[in-house]
Every structure is written in C-alpha cells, then in structure tokens.
Image (cartoon, rainbow, N blue to C red):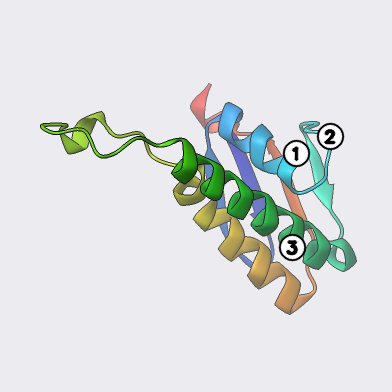
Amino acid sequence: MIRFTSPAGASVSMFEKDAKALIRMMGHSGTIPSAIRAEDIATALQQLEAALQTTEEKSQEAQPSKLQGQDAEEKAVSINVRAYPLIELLKAASAKQKNVMWEKDSAFF
C-alpha cells in the first residue's frame, strides 16, 4: 500500500500498482517515497487528469457492448474511480499551496 499525504487534507492510501500508475500519469518516475512541491502540483494535476481522460476514452472504444447477464461484481473498478481521492487531495494541496508526499504505508505491513 502507498499513502499520499499533505497538510492540505486527509491522507489517501491505495495499492502500490495503482499508485505507481497514477504517479507516472502525473509526470513523475514512480519512485517511492517521493513528493511534489506545492508549486508543481497544478501541473501534475493537469497531467493526471489529461492521462485519465485519454485512458477513459481508450477503454470506452475498446469496450464491447455490455455483456448480457454480467454481474456487477465481475466489473473492475476503473483507474478513474481509484484516482478520485488523490485528485481531491491534489486540488486541496494546490489551493492551499502545500506539498504532497507519498510513501509505503507501514500500517499494512
């Protein structure tokens, strides 16, 4: 698990695979631990939202018609849904000019 923290809001934890993908979408290397300085958050947020939009468009194009009889449990949670708490944290940090840090969450080990 990776935990994103900022003095601007509540921490956000997510699986390492998803966290690294989102970190890379923000234009960073995926290094853990690391951080984004307050003055760079707006750019990182813009890159993340653009990458998620592209991902959503590609998944809609590739998605066949809804399968009949498919249970809701069988549907995967999209990266866009998983990214929502991080996006909100980035928005709060940008508004309050605070850094965002991430590290392995030792509470899950």
Residue shown at the point (61%, 41%) measured from the top left? 3
> Upstream in the sequence, badge 3 or badge 2?
2
Mark sitting earlier along the chain (2/1)? 1
Q: For the residue carrying disc 2, how many other residues have a C-alpha within 10 Å: few (<14), some (14-19), or many (20+)?
A: few
Residues at discs 2 and 1 in contact (Cβ within 8 Å): yes
Give neighbour class at mark 1: few <14, some 14-19, many 20+ (Cα, 10 Å): some
Mark 1: amino acid: Arg
Q: Is residue 103 above or below residue 12?
A: above
Name the secondary structure under disc 2: loop
Q: Is residue 23 above or below residue 68?
A: below
Label at residue 24: 1
In which image quadrant can residue 30 be found? top right
Residue designated by label 3 = 46
Furthest toward the bottom, the residue is 95
The residue that mark 2 highlights is 29
Location of residue 71 in the rendering, given as x and y in whole percent from the top left corner: 15, 33
Question: Is 102 located above or below residue 88 in the figure?
Answer: above
Name which of mark 1 and mark 3 comes first in the sequence. Answer: 1
Residue 93 falls in image quadrant: bottom right
Residue 36 has which mark? none
Q: Residue type at mark 3?
A: Gln
Local SS, label 1: helix
| Mark 1 and mark 3: Cα distance apart in space | 13 Å
